[in-house]
Image (spheres, rainbow, N blue to C red):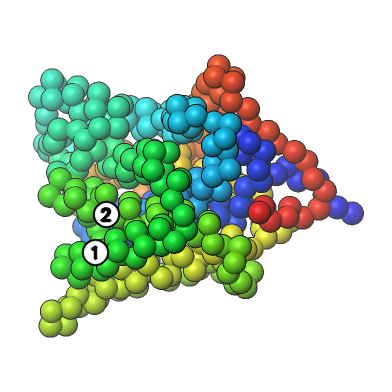
């Protein structure tokens, strides 16, 4: 007997790529693991896990390009640029606001980092306002030159906005060949940068903020191009579980040494972005979630953005405790094991009782419809 499943659709009625949704959730979870363990252990030792998980941001950019092209490429005859910006703001900005607010509250009330979380109230207020607007914030104490001082991961959302603006004004008009040329040329610059800097871990901080638009351009344009050509490429159906394992292995690889003039670590990062991530996205686009995994894909995909944008204030509290109280290894691991499900639960609360209601109200207010349908049996792949 076939069991009815609810299939998410975009505001235009298109079915989601469920496996790609699931992969977005997997990448967001790995970012949380990266932050929790590395901030707690000072990026050193055997518990400094998933060393390359900062590449999840490049993976997000590529997924975003693919999904934006899928959702909007064929809608421009009946949608204005202003309408597109409104849809994307409704989708993205409510969580920017809650992320900035949680970041401010965490900064003010962190009981373990008072010595370093010391900033003039006027400067802190300016940092909060710029965070609400998703603009680069002034530096504040204890935040290591982060361009989004109160909610560090929001730096990539600022780039996401720039990518959406570029898509609406220019990129959507370009042919697949032109997109491929932009991807290729920017990819060469990415290889040079990765080799020169030793990794692609940059763009979130002021000293290397110039890396942010480069990482965005390479991966976002790659995502747009992949959507335009994915139907012409045949690739085996792999599924969420195996593709997630590939991501884990990719992120958990060691930090490679420098050999002569070549940084093996930087070149590894570039190879992941330019070659591995396109294969993972194509594999996910051509895979069916199946009745056994579709609910996990849906839940994981829905939770990915709230989890990504809300977890870091709690990580800073744990890190401050680790730095000031010097707990034993067992205590630290126990706290980590409690924090991970806690931030997942908080992100679920934010999704259900803030993000979804606010987006629903704004969508009704501006006449943007979102539909769901019930289908029997296995959800087919959207094309």
**Residue linked to disc 2:** 214
| Circle on res. 189 | 1
Using residue 372 as the reference point, say whether residue 242 is left or right of it. left
Residue 316 vertical position relative to residue 334 in the rendered view, above or below: above
Q: Residue at x 56, y 23 (%)?
A: 363
* Labels in figure, total: 2
The residue most toward the top is 365
Left or right of residue 227, residue 211 in this image: left
Task: Estimate the x, y position of residue 89 in percent, counting from the top left.
Answer: 44, 30
Residue 140 seen in the current view: yes
The quadrant where residue 309 appears: top left
Label 2 CA crowd tier, 10 Å (few <14, some 14–19, many 20+): some
Question: Dot 1: few (<14), some (14–19), or many (≥20) neighbours within 10 Å?
Answer: some
Residue 344, given in percent of the width and then of the height, sits at 47, 43
Label 1 vs 2, first from the N-terminus: 1
Please tell me the numbered disc located at residue 254.
none
Which of 312/201 is in front? 201
Residue farthest right in this picture? 1
Is there CB contact under 8 Å for labels 1 and 2?
yes
Q: Is residue 179 left or right of residue 5?
A: left
Q: Residue at x 24, y 27 (%)?
A: 130
Q: CA distance from mark 1 to mark 2?
A: 8 Å
Who's the residue at 16% across and 52% down the image? Answer: 208
* Residue 27 visible in this rendered orientation of the protein: no
Q: Secondary structure at mark 1?
A: helix
- Residue visible at 56% across and 62% down? 230
């Amino acid at each position: 007997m076939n069991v009815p499943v609810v299939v998410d659709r975009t505001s235009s009625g298109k079915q989601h790529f469920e496996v790609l949704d699931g992969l977005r959730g997997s990448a967001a979870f790995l970012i949380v693991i990266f932050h929790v363990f590395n901030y707690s252990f000072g990026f050193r030792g055997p518990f400094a896990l998933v060393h390359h998980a900062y590449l999840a941001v490049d993976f997000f950019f590529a997924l975003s390009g693919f999904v934006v092209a899928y959702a909007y490429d064929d809608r421009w005859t009946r949608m204005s640029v202003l309408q597109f910006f409104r849809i994307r703001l409704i989708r993205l900005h409510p969580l920017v606001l809650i992320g900035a607010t949680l970041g401010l509250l965490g900064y003010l009330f962190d009981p373990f980092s008072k010595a370093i979380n010391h900033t003039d109230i006027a400067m802190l207020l300016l940092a909060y306002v710029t965070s609400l607007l998703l603009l680069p914030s002034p530096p504040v104490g204890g935040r290591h030159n982060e361009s989004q001082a109160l909610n560090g991961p929001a730096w990539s959302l600022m780039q996401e906005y720039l990518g959406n603006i570029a898509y609406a004004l220019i990129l959507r008009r370009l042919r697949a060949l032109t997109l491929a040329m932009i991807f290729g040329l920017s990819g060469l610059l990415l290889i040079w940068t990765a080799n020169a800097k030793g990794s692609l871990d940059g763009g979130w901080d002021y000293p290397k903020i110039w890396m942010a638009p480069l990482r965005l351009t390479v991966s976002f344009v790659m995502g747009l191009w992949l959507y335009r050509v994915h139907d012409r490429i045949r690739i085996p159906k792999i599924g969420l579980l195996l593709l997630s394992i590939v991501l884990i292995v990719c992120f958990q690889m060691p930090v490679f040494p420098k050999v002569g003039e070549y940084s093996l670590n930087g070149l590894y990062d570039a190879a992941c972005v330019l070659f591995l991530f396109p294969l993972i996205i194509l594999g996910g686009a051509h895979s069916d979630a199946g009745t056994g995994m579709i609910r996990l894909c849906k839940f994981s995909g829905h939770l990915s953005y709230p989890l990504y944008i809300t977890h870091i204030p709690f990580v800073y509290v744990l890190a401050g405790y680790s730095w000031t109280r010097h707990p034993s290894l067992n205590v630290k691991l126990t706290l980590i094991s409690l924090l991970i499900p806690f931030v997942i639960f908080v992100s679920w609360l934010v999704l259900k009782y803030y993000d979804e209601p606010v987006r629903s109200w704004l969508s009704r207010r501006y006449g943007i419809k979102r539909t769901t349908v019930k289908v029997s049996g296995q959800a087919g792949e959207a094309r």
